[in-house]
Image (cartoon, helix red, strand yellow):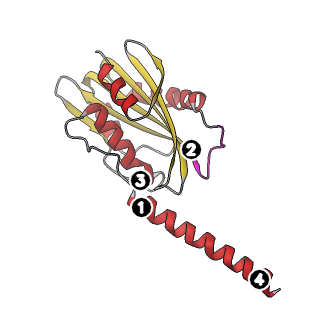
Amino acid sequence: MNLDDQRTELERMGYAIVSATESELVAVRSRRCWDGLATKLTAVVFVRSLPSLTGAEIQADAARMLAAAKDVDPSRLPQGLLKNRAAIAVYLAGTVEPEARQICASPQPVRLPSLFYPATLERSSGTAYYSKATPLWGGVFYAKFRYLVQRLLEPASAPATEPVSLFGVVMTVLVGALLLLGLAALVLAVVLG
């Protein structure tokens, strides 16, 4: 299957294509998410076209893609506080086995220090499978992952703009307020001696 539509959409969204073959496309975007505690998120997207998709293949890809994401991450900031990396696997498959459907539709286990988000479009049925849940760990980014997946798999029904994480905005404001209070207390302690 031709990946030109996905390539065009990724480039429109500001992703740089780092690798492209007839059956796989790899793109990366690294930017600060002000609605996510000002965290710098590097999202590495792997778009694959294949005849059929199995659960075992997704599990094997998770390890491969997370390692590859680390290699193409342009940010040299250390992982952890204020820096996250996500490997987003987008499969365009002729058929999708039930186990693969379940994996894509379920929240993924935490794979520190990175996040893995798989999604698939079963071409034979026209059905997309991806997690609509928002886990606590990395939750400020999941609306962004879903938006990206929708733009690549279901562009007609995808939102026009990338969503803002309300949870992330609230957390950013709370953490910012706590930091300002701490700084004010420190200044007051120094002034009062």
Q: Is residue 96 left or right of residue 177?
A: left
Given this view, does label 2 or label 1 mark the residue nearer the observer?
A: 1
- Neighbor class of circle 3 (other Cα within 10 Å; few <14, some 14-19, many 20+) is some
Tell me the amino acid under the disc marked 2: Leu
Between disc 1 and disc 3, whose residue precedes? 3
Work out which residue is located at the far right of the displayed protein and give it.
193
Which callout, 4 or 3, points to the residue nearer the camera?
4
CA distance separating discs 2 and 1: 21 Å
- In the rendered image, residue 9, in percent from the top left (x then y), is placed at 33, 30
- Residue 189's tag is 4
From the viewer's perspective, is the residue at label 1 or at label 4 nearer? 4
Query: Mark 1 and mark 3: span between their CA atoms?
Result: 12 Å
78 within the magenta span: yes
Q: Earlier in the sequence, mark 3 or mark 2?
A: 2
Residue 135 is labelled as 3
Mark 1, secondary structure of its residue: helix
Indicate whether residue 120 is drawn in magenta.
no
The type of residue carrying mark 1 is Phe
In the rendering, which numbered label is found on residue 167?
1
Q: Residue under circle 2?
A: 112
**Labels in figure, total:** 4
- The magenta segment: 76-84
The quadrant where residue 23 appears = top left
